[in-house]
Amino acid sequence: MYLLNGESKHCIGFTDRGFQYGDGLFETIEVSNGKPVFLNQHLQRLFNSCKKLLIPPPDIDILRQEAMQVARHSNSPTAVLKLIVTRGSGGRGYRQPETINATRLFSLHPFPDYPESFKQKGIKVRFCQTRLGINPALAGIKHMNRLEQIMARAEWDSTDIQEGLMLDINNNVIEGTMTNVFAVKNNSLITPEISQCGVNGILRNIVLNLAKNNKIKVREKALSQESLLFADEVFVTNSIIGLWPVNQIEQQMYQVGPLTSKLQSEFLAFRQKESDAC
């Protein structure tokens, strides 16, 4: 199922700047029983990111209606809804068109077949050699330029490893190739600060708020490889997987600890509440 600028088609013009330059943004949204999960949060992030990139944001009510329209076509209990917004079509060269007509594209995809054990027993991850560049102007934004993540994900083929952790050029741990990362040390929750690079994930913000609501001390700070390896607990998040504990980084082993389990339970309850309200 595709919906391009409100029409049921999927052929984008070759002059579209999303194709030409990766000039756009995207959101990846869980669909549960025909309803987009955390839709308001995704649309608000998209709206804010459009403003940062000087892309006239599409009408948020139209986006909401189209998201619901596409999600209802799901033939299974779970699916993935992808939303792409680009700066639209323009001529050759980096200068943006005088008149910008943003392109919006919704597409519906099967939900990944992840084993339930990933949520219960955790996953194995590794450090990637590919580094994230520093660019405060793009920090936090889920823009379409994902070559760093693509190169990092190409570093391993083993099915034993479910995620790779990416560092910046100063060797600070920032995120996974598809996730945000959290560490627990002395009953405090730590996540890398992302003012210089990295994606400000929807689940990242939800987990931080849940932690604060449960009186868990939260710190957003620079996180070294050594600090992460010597953490008491580690877990990763994104909008599709939810929250996965980490049971191994390289040769370092971890238990699925009490704070991770607590936040996992809190998240599942919050997600159910949000789904019921849709």
Image (cartoon, rainbow, N blue to C red):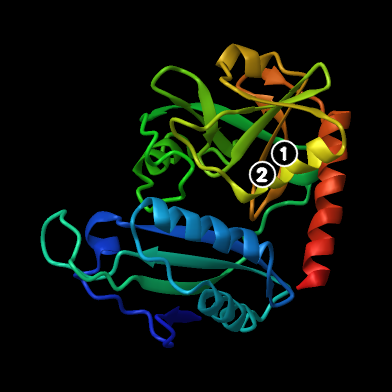
Marks 2/1: CA distance?
A: 5 Å
Q: Nearer the viewer, residue 175 or 218?
A: 218
Figure check: 134 above or below 162: above
10 Å crowding of disc 1: few (<14), some (14-19), many (20+): many
Extreme-bottom residue of the structure: 7
Can residue 160 be spotted in the picture? no
- Residue at horizontal 50%, vertical 40%? 177
Where disc 2 sits, the SS reads helix
In which quarter of the view is residue 212 placed?
Answer: top right
197 or 20: nearer the viewer: 197
Q: Are marks 2 and 1 in contact (CB under 8 Å)?
A: yes
Residue 18 visible, this orientation:
yes
Q: Quadrant of the C terminus?
A: bottom right
Residue 266 picture location, percent across and down: 85, 46
Tag 2: amino acid: Asn
Q: Which labelled disc corresponds to residue 226?
A: none
- Residue 193, percent from left and from top: 56, 29
| Residue behind mark 2 | 205
Tell me the residue at 62%/79% (across/down). Answer: 68
Most foreground residue, 119 or 99: 99
Identified at 37% across, 39% down, the residue is 137
Residue 24 on image: x %, y %? 35, 58
Task: Give coordinates of residue 91: x percent, y percent.
Answer: 12, 66
Q: To which residue does mark 1 refer?
A: 208
Q: Quadrant of residue 151?
A: top left
Q: Is residue 107 above or below residue 7?
A: above
Q: Amino acid at mark 1?
A: Leu
Mark 2 crowd level (few <14, some 14–19, many ≥20, 10 Å Cα): few
